[in-house]
Image (cartoon, grey):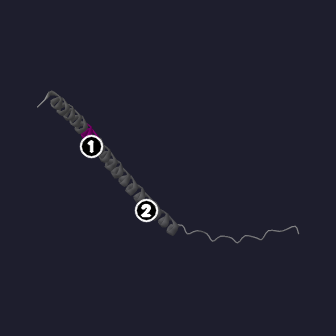
């Protein structure tokens, strides 16, 4: 082989190596982002479940309080006088 062919092949190999390293970094970053996203989604799901459980407990407590202390009947409002 001649010298220009060897030089060209070496340049091609360096470019391919550079491209492969760049692809590996991109892949690693994408995997890290996906792991972080999954962790955030898990945390949000736990928080949502806790909130829904609290709301259900509050609703049950309010219903129990309503059963213990029934609301007094509301008075009918008197009609307003108009200056006509």
**Mark 1 highlights which residue?**
27
First in residue order: circle 2 vs circle 1: 1
Q: Position of residue 43 (x, y in %)?
A: 35, 50
Q: Hey, which residue is sitting farthest left in the picture?
A: 1
Q: Residue at x 87, y 67 (%)?
A: 83
Can residue 45 be found in the magenta stretch? no
What segment carries the magenta color?
A: 22-28
Q: Position of residue 55 (x, y in %)?
A: 45, 59
For the residue pair 58 and 26, the one nearer the viewer reads as: 26
- Labels 2 and 1 touching (C-beta < 8 A): no
Quadrant, the N terminus: top left
Q: Residue at x 21, y 31 (%)?
A: 11
Quadrant, the C terminus: bottom right
What kind of element bears circle 1? helix
**Mark 2 highlights which residue?**
56
Q: Report, in whole angstroms, how far the alpha carbon at label 2 lies from the one at label 1.
A: 43 Å
What kind of element bears circle 2? helix
Side of 14 where 63 appears, left or right: right
Q: Position of residue 41 (x, y in %)?
A: 35, 51
Side of 71 where 9 appears, left or right: left
Q: Residue at x 15, y 30 (%)?
A: 6
Q: Position of residue 73 (x, y in %)?
A: 63, 71
For the residue pair 58 and 16, the one nearer the viewer reads as: 16
Q: Residues within 10 Å of mark 1 (few under 14, many from 20)?
A: few
- Identify whether 58 is placed above or below 70: above
**Mark closer to the observer (2, 1):** 1
Can residue 25 be found in the magenta stretch? yes
To which quarter of the image does residue 9 belong? top left
For the residue pair 27 and 77, the one nearer the viewer reads as: 27
Q: Residue at x 45, y 64 (%)?
A: 60
Q: Residues within 10 Å of mark 2 (few under 14, many from 20)?
A: few
To which quarter of the image does residue 22 belong? top left
């Amino acid at each position: 082989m001649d010298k220009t062919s060897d030089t060209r092949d070496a340049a091609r190999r360096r470019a391919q190596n550079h491209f492969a390293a760049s692809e590996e970094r991109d892949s690693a970053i994408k995997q890290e982002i996906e792991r972080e996203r999954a962790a955030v989604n898990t945390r949000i799901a736990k928080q949502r479940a806790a909130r829904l459980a609290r709301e259900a407990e509050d609703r049950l407590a309010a219903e129990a309080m309503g059963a213990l202390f029934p609301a007094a009947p509301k008075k009918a409002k008197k009609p307003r006088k108009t200056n006509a």
